[in-house]
Amino acid sequence: MAQRGNASSQRQSSLVNPTDLILFGLIIALVAFGLNILLASSSFMAREQFSDPYFFLKKQAFAAFLGFLGMLAMTQIDPDRYRHLVWPIYAISVFLLILVFVPGIGRRAGGASRWIVIGGLSVQPSDFAKVALVLALARIYSQAREVDLKLSMMTLLIIAVPAFLIAIEQDLGTAIHLVLVASTLLFFTRYPLTMQFAALVSGVAVVTYIIIKTPFRLGRIKAFLDPWESRYDAGFQLVASMKAFLAGGISGRGLGEELVRHHLQERHTDFILAIVAEDLGAIGVILLLGTYFVIATYGLILASRLKDDFMRLMATGFLLCLILQVIINSAVTMGLMPTKGINLPLVSNGGTSLLVYLVMCGMMLSALRREQN
């Protein structure tokens, strides 16, 4: 009886622990905040386009509901199972990226082919590629006992396939994000620093070549360097974002439909941070980015203590996905980087992105919990 009681108490303690409560609470707070700021940023546009001010909110809330179910499910699954499903998940991810180019299945919008339509629902496969790539790299890095040319070439191929497919979808921002995640994850492995530096230089060279060979991307670079000169063309979004930041000041104007935001064409997706700045000011921006920083820092500290290399690299990779995307989106919105089509995770409109990031968080919590029990 005593042994059965001890086992029961151990199971109960495994269901709730301080790590889960802190990280889970911060994630819920980000999603709840995102739903509120999404309504403030999109209600006028939704009313004009769909005669329903809650159109975008309803879709995002449904994705959040599914995402939370997925996150809770992932926390209850033994993370050892992910180790054995790495290659099927990677293969399915690459297959979905290829489906984007199939007529009748892939959907083109805004000059890019990034979506597939399944049962009337639009899905962005590049979001699933983030999970697949992190799992594949965690598996490769954790099994490597010696870094040789064969392993290096295999690693390069694993990274290059999804990155290339996403790049030719005209989604260079996400492709760069994937390469950055993979390159940064190298610092948490036994790969030599010379190899890590070579990977970084190679990635920069490839991106530079793509930009030089693409006229509209060169236009974005010029707009980034002098947005006011091209404020009626390529620099329009960036100038509108800067105006929103200036309008918000320190404490913001309060949640609502201010006039400044109507010049932002992607105010509910890629430039939602500008709406945070306009409504809640610099204080709101600092608190929002500070929440991401706490999640990333606390999560990386806990992940660094994991003894299992696969678990450690998987949790670290998911955290890098989150924080690097936040850095890119924030830098673009503030005019510190050229404009890229990449949203603010857990906050911006985008059902697939929200669902995938919540599932990532569940897998990360599962790995952290397993090591603590």
Image (tube, helix red, strand yellow):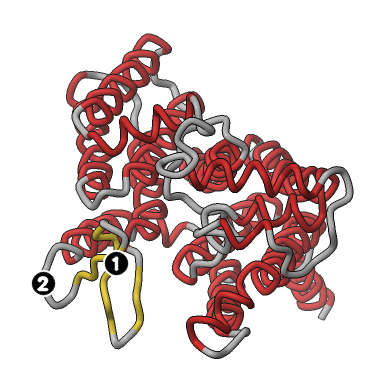
The residue closer to the viewer here, 226 or 362, is: 226
Q: Residue at x 55, y 73 (%)?
A: 67
> Which residue corresponds to mark 1?
115
Q: Is residue 334 left or right of residue 98?
A: right
Q: Residue 328 placed where, x, y %?
A: 53, 39
- Tell me: 346 left or right of 318: right
Residue at the spot 54% in from the left edge and 33% down from the top edge: 228
Q: Amino acid at mark 2?
A: Pro
Mark 2 lies on residue: 103
- Horizontal relation, residue 105 to residue 330: left or right: left
- The residue positioned 84% from the left and 58% from the top of the image is 253
Secondary structure under tag 1 reads: strand
Q: Residue furthest left?
A: 103
Residue 76 sits above or below residue 369 on the image: below
Q: Is residue 312 visible?
A: no
Whether residue 331 is situated above or below residue 132 in the rendered picture: above
Q: Residues within 10 Å of mark 1 (few under 14, many from 20)?
A: many
**Residue that extends furthest to the bottom in the rendered view of this protein:** 51
Q: Residue at the spot x=79%, y=43% of the render?
A: 286
Q: Position of residue 48 (x, y in %)?
A: 54, 81
User: Where residue 157 appears, x then y in whole percent?
Assistant: 20, 36
Specify the quadrant that holds the N terminus. Answer: bottom right
Q: Nearer the viewer, residue 100 or 130?
A: 100
The quarter of the picture where the C terminus appears is bottom right
- What amino acid is labelled 1 in the image? Trp
In front: 231, or 315?
Answer: 231
Answer with the quarter of the image where residue 153 lies. Answer: top left
Residue count near mark 2 (Cα–Cα under 10 Å), binned few <14, some 14–19, many ≥20:
few
